[in-house]
Structure formats: C-alpha cells, structure tokens
Image (spheres, rainbow, N blue to C red):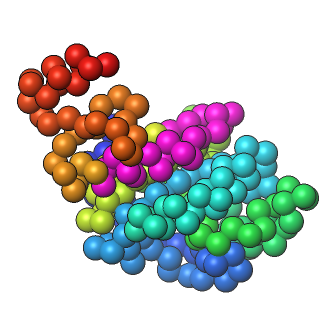
C-alpha cells in the first residue's frame, strides 16, 4: 500500500552528520515547517551501486539546499559502519566528502515503516522467528513536504540505480504546483509549460505538442 499523501513515519535513530559526527536521536521532525526532505534508502555500506548514488546526491546537494531541501540517506548498517565508509577515500570505494546525514536503521523498523525492507519476519513450523527475504532496504526515495507529508515515492530493486536529476526535477515540480496552483504534465521541467486543471488548458497544451 502506498504511503504517498500520508504523514512520513516518525523515527529516532543514530546517524552520522557532517561526514564525521555520530549522534543519537536523529529525526526528520527537525525539518517540519522549515524544509522539504528527500529521504532515501540504500541497501548497504561498502557496496557498488550505493556509493554512486550517495556521491551523486552530494554533487547536487547545493542545488537541493538552494530549494530548501534537506537530503538524508538511510540504510540498515550501524553508525560505526557509516562513519568508516565516510572516512574511506573514493579511490578505495569510500564516500569521503559526503556531508548530509546518513541514518543507521539497525532495528530495520524505519525501512519496514516506509515499506522498503526487502522481506519480513515470520515464524516457521517450529514456531521460531525467521526472516523471509533479504533484511536490507531496497532503493526507496521519498519526497516529503514541509508539513511532513510524503508527496512522491519510488522504489528500485537492488541492481537499479536511481536518477538523482529526476529527484531534483520532482522537487521543482512540487514547489511549482504549490506556488502557482498548476499541475505538471509528462516530462515537465523548470521553464516548461504547466497546466490548469480544466479542459481548455489541457486541449491547448496537447494541441501545441
């Protein structure tokens, strides 16, 4: 079941901030009423596709921040593993230089509540608790507005890296609709025509494309 248009699940967890500081009690609540949030999950530290995505978010961080957007990453690794990876140079497969927060979902409850944990707990015939699937997060991306409501989500399987530029495009689209009250058609980007929610606007748009 989609959680788009619902309140983002609350959590308090360990995280690494500013690329070097381990903290407890990190929460998205700090951004309520202040910033939009791009909250994304990735499977594991010290892997292959994950650093390309994490570093791509860092490369575009200034563009997100210029639009009042906080970028926050999350995996089921520990804060210690996050920090070790952040301290590892890029040439050695690390993500040194990343400054936005990385949350440690060691209990797997955050990924579960956001619907991106690749499996679930259950019981076998001996009534023993077992995990069916892979106990790490899929590549979920969530765009959360300033009121804490999820406005967009997309979930990729492990081998499929996400498009960071399209995440930024969706931020622009959301902010445009909030400001002007218009809706954004297929492949909309900043500077392109949007639509009013009436037949005349749609007809004019379709007739010009």
Question: Is 189 located above or below residue 59 in the figure?
Answer: above
Q: Going 19% across and 43% down the picture, which residue do you hit?
A: 182
Which quarter of the rendering shows the C terminus? top left
Q: Going 48% across and 47% down the picture, which residue do you hit?
A: 167
Q: Going 30% across and 31% down the picture, which residue do you hit?
A: 185
Magenta residue check for 205: no
109 sits left or right of 135 in the view: left
- Quadrant location of residue 104? bottom right
Would residue 131 be seen by someone viewing this image from the given angle?
Answer: no
Where in the figure is residue 186, as x and y percent of width and height? 35, 28
Magenta highlight range: 155-175
50 sits left or right of 9 in the view: right
Which quarter of the rendering shows the N terminus? top left
Magenta residue check for 157: yes
Would residue 188 be seen by someone viewing this image from the given angle?
Answer: yes
Give the residue at the far front of this rendering: 208
Question: Is 23 located above or below residue 35 in the figure?
Answer: below
- Quadrant location of residue 58? bottom right
- Relative depth, front residue between 45 and 125: 45
Where in the figure is residue 144, as x and y percent of width and height? 36, 57
């Amino acid at each position: 079941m989609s959680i788009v248009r619902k309140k983002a699940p609350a959590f308090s967890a360990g995280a690494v901030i500013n690329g070097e500081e381990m903290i407890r009690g990190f929460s998205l609540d700090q951004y309520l009423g202040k910033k939009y949030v791009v909250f994304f999950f990735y499977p594991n530290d010290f892997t292959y596709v994950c650093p390309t995505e994490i570093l791509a978010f860092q490369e575009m961080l200034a563009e997100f921040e210029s639009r009042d957007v906080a970028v926050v990453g999350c995996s089921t690794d520990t804060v210690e593993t996050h920090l070790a990876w952040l301290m590892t140079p890029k040439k050695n497969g690390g993500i040194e230089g990343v400054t936005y927060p990385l949350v440690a979902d060691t209990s797997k409850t955050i990924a579960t509540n956001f619907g991106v944990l690749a499996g679930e707990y259950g019981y076998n015939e001996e009534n023993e608790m077992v995990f069916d699937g892979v106990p790490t997060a899929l590549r979920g991306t969530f765009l959360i507005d300033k009121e804490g409501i999820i406005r967009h989500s997309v979930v990729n399987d492990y081998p499929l890296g996400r498009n960071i530029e399209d995440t930024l495009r969706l931020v622009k689209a959301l902010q445009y609709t909030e400001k002007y009250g218009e809706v954004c058609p297929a492949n909309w980007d900043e500077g392109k025509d949007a639509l009013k929610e009436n037949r005349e606007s749609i007809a004019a748009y379709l007739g010009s494309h």
